[in-house]
Image (cartoon, grey):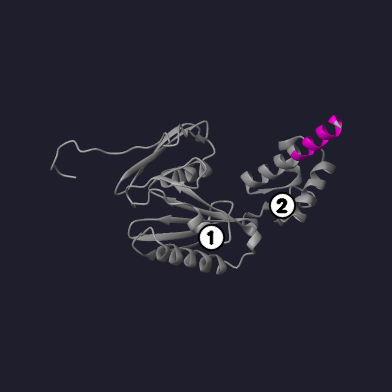
Amino acid sequence: MKKNFTVATLKINNIKNVLNYIYTQKRATPQMLQEATLLSRPTIAQILRELQEEQLIFQGGLADSTGGRKANLYEFNPDIKVTVGVELLIDHYEIVAIDLYAEILKFEKFNLTFSDNDAYFDEVCNSVNHFINDLDVRPDQILGVGIALQALISADGKHIIYGKVLNCTGMDIKEFNSRIPYPCTFNHDAESNANVELWMNPLLKNAIYFNIRSDVSGAIIIDRKFFKGGEYKSGVFEHMTIVPGGEP
């Protein structure tokens, strides 16, 4: 049993290493994969077949000739899964869809004053559902819907602990889960933005991220992960009045 478990674990790790290399390099030949992973050519060939069957990669043409037969180039399929993001702001909301390379597939902005009531939730969720339907993707391609807002979020992403800017303290994710047929979660706006920085810069390890707009928020990144602290989060950067009645 232990031997079977070890073999299965090794196979999974080999597949992950091959897929990760193709993902990060964008395009790769079997020879490049063999040199990077130190796996045998038959093992590489088997993994490539399995990844193609799962539509995680596809054959993207031929590499330049080095004197012999041109090698097949394999590319990662970024459209295999799509994520939808919604940002709720005081006077409007925005919806965006991205692929697994964080490339924007579609973006829309809607003018609507925030209000913690059924009419507001109905309109926003209807917009999200129409937005997703217009993407021309299968339901199983949608990973979920992340809802970013200027508020302190519970550790499980289901409740607004403190929402002074939007006056939404106590708002529950069920308002969206009951109207949108995909998993929904709340996200602190600054952490969502900092996550993009992590995604786009694999060398970024430790950082303090400031999100400066009409207000100030932020996130602390340690070893490529958000330092969460307690329920009220660690990366909460606010501002205070220095001179009462002074210039903003």
Q: For mark 1, what is the residue?
A: 178
Residue 158 in view in this figure: yes
- Mark 1 lies on a secondary structure that is loop
Q: Residue furthest left?
A: 245
CA–CA distance in space, label 1 to label 2: 44 Å
Front position in the image: 228 or 37 = 228
Front position in the image: 180 or 66 = 180
Residue at screen point 15% across, 37% down: 243
Quadrant where the image shows the C terminus: top left
Magenta stretch? 2-12
- In the rendered structure, the answer to whether residue 115 lies left or right of residue 69 reads left
What is the crowding at mark 2: few (fewer than 14 residues within 10 Å), some, or many (at least 20)?
many
Q: For mark 2, what is the residue?
A: 73
For the residue marked with disc 2, what is the amino acid? Leu
| Location of residue 117 by image quarter | bottom left
Q: Position of residue 21 (x, y in %)?
A: 67, 42
For the residue marked with disc 1, what is the amino acid? Ser
Q: Position of residue 100 (x, y in %)?
A: 59, 52
What is the crowding at mark 1: few (fewer than 14 residues within 10 Å), some, or many (at least 20)?
few
Residue 64 in view in this figure: no
